[in-house]
Image: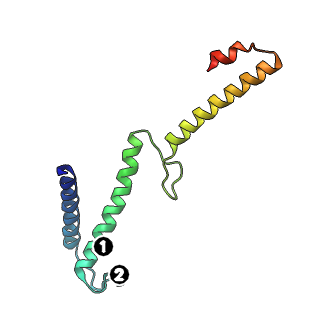
Amino acid sequence: MVEKILKAGLLGLVLAVAIYASAKAGTPKELPGIAMGWKLLFHVERAGALLGAIGVVVLIGWRALAGEFPIKFGNVEYAVKDAAADARQATAAQEQRIRVLEVLAGIRDVEDLDDAS
């Protein structure tokens, strides 16, 4: 519980620092329509966009350090571990089928099927 509160507090602090940095960078003379003429909303939106972009880059970098690279980049997708597990299962099933066919063809003995399991 305390850990969740600390994480939320840290996130709030980072957002506040980003809003402060946006305010220090200045406000354009003519605000974009999304800000609805409100300077504070403009800075919150700018800080949110900045944190979102940095968050995506950091997340991809962090997962890359763990050896997990995205398979596709349009919608960032991490299916490497799932694909490897599926490949192992498919390989084991294929090897079992081959052993059965070898027994049926007379290449192996029936006892070889029990040893492979």
Above-or-below relation of 31 to 109: below
- Identify residue type, mark 1: Glu
Residue carrying label 2: 34
Which element is circle 2 on? helix
Please give the name of the residue rendered at 18% of the width and 58% of the height, measured from the top-left corner: 9
Please give the name of the residue rendered at 79% of the width and 15% of the height, measured from the top-left corner: 107
The image quadrant that residue 84 belongs to is top right
Q: How many marks?
A: 2
Tag 2 near tag 1, CB within 8 Å: yes
**Residue 68 in picture, x, y percent from top left:** 45, 42
| Closer to the camera in the image, 2 or 15 | 2
Above-or-below relation of 56 to 37: above
Which quadrant of the rendered structure holds the C terminus? top right
| Closer to the camera in the image, 89 or 27 | 89
Residues packed near mark 1 inside 10 Å, few (<14), some (14 to 19) or many (20 plus): some
Residue carrying label 1: 45
Please give the name of the residue rendered at 19% of the width and 71% of the height, measured from the top-left corner: 24
Q: Please report whichever mark, 2 or 1, sits nearer to the chain's N-terminal start.
A: 2
Above-or-below relation of 101 to 61: above
| Closer to the camera in the image, 70 or 12 | 12
**Residue 60 in picture, x, y percent from top left:** 40, 50
In this picture the colour scheme is rainbow
Residues packed near mark 2 inside 10 Å, few (<14), some (14 to 19) or many (20 plus): few
